[in-house]
Image (cartoon, helix red, strand yellow):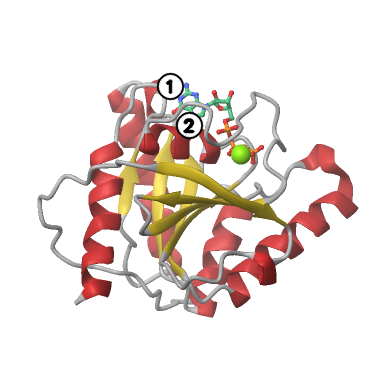
């Protein structure tokens, strides 16, 4: 099976985005109650504990903006953060957390699927993958589903501070080969460490370039 994915590929301009303002906007489980101002938004998804909330704090430079925890299952709502009064970062609950039980997992999955299905403002979804792990079935299935529903996405490998550069390269190469078994091409890929503030400029510049294209 070869799925054609929708990605936003372009030559990135070297403009450094400046986060002048980052503020919490609203949290809810109901996509109909998300902000209705039409601003573009960029959401973070991935398995529980992969580092979504930490990444939002690292990108915005505000440590306590999104709540984080060493225990999986911390984020349970759709959280909107307004950036520079112009666009949103969205922290989503993680999928696949076993301790939540089948019912709990299904409820979270419904919130996520509803958001992905209905939220027209979603401009790019960043799928976070823990760089230490081999390709996980749940992540591959999730990404396949994005391909089928035509949602533009990019991949972020998180927690890169936890691996040596040789092990990191090895893991990422295995991951890319696995992705290419399913897809014709790779989406944009980023490498981050919230601990070492790595990958910040690359992710923010990518968002900035898309925002500028939307303004044209
Ligand atoms: N070493 C290291 N630890 C990280 C990094 N990012 C996150 N963590 C840690 O991983 C744990 C989970 O981080 P969160 O940001 O809460 O993860 P999440 O994906 O938002 O989790 P849920 O909200 O439960 O879905 C915390 O203990 C973080 O300190 C990173 O880049 N490096
Ligand atoms: Mg979280």
Classify mark 1 as within 8 Å of ligand 1 or not, answering yes or no: yes
Tag 2's secondary structure?
Answer: loop
Q: Is residue 107 visible?
A: yes
Question: Image quadrant for the C terminus?
Answer: bottom left
User: Residue at point 53% right, 78% down?
Assistant: 148
Which mark's residue is nearer the viewer, 2 or 1? 1
Q: Which mark is residue 119?
A: none
The residue indicated by pointer 1 is: 162
Q: Residue 132 carries which label?
A: 2
User: Residue at point 18% right, 67% down?
Assistant: 10
Please give left or right for residue 108 compared with residue 90 in the image: right
Please give left or right for residue 179 compared with residue 198 in the image: right
Locate residue 120, reporting x and y percent: 51, 76
Residue 207, located in which quarter of the rendered image? bottom left
Q: Quadrant of ligand 1?
A: top right
> Which of the two discs, 2 and 1, labels the residue nearer the N terminus?
2
Locate residue 86, reporting x and y percent: 36, 59
Crowding at label 2, few (<14), some or many (≥20) Cα neighbours within 10 Å? some
Tag 1's secondary structure?
Answer: helix
- Residue 162 lies, with reference to residue 56, above or below; the image says above
Between the C-alphas of marks 2 and 1, the distance is: 7 Å
């Amino acid at each position: 099976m070869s799925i054609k994915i929708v990605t936003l590929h372009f030559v990135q301009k070297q403009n450094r985005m400046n986060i002048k303002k980052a503020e919490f906007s609203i949290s809810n489980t109901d996509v109909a109650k998300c902000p209705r101002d039409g601003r573009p938004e960029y959401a973070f998804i991935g398995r529980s504990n992969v580092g979504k909330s930490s990444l939002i704090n690292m990108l915005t430079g505000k440590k306590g903006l999104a709540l984080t925890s060493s225990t999986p299952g911390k984020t349970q709502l759709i959280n909107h953060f307004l950036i520079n009064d112009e666009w949103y970062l969205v922290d989503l609950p993680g999928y696949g957390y076993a301790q939540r039980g089948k019912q709990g997992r299904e409820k979270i999955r419904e919130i996520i699927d509803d958001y992905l299905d209905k939220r027209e403002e979603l401009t790019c979804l960043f799928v976070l993958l823990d760089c230490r792990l081999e390709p996980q079935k749940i992540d591959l299935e999730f990404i396949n589903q994005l391909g089928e529903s035509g949602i533009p996405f990019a991949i972020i490998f998180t927690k890169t501070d936890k691996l040596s550069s040789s092990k990191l390269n090895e893991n990422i190469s295995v991951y890319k080969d696995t992705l290419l078994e399913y897809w014709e091409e790779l989406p944009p890929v980023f490498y981050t460490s919230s601990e070492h503030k790595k990958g910040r400029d690359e992710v923010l510049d990518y968002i900035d370039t898309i925002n500028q294209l939307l303004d044209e």
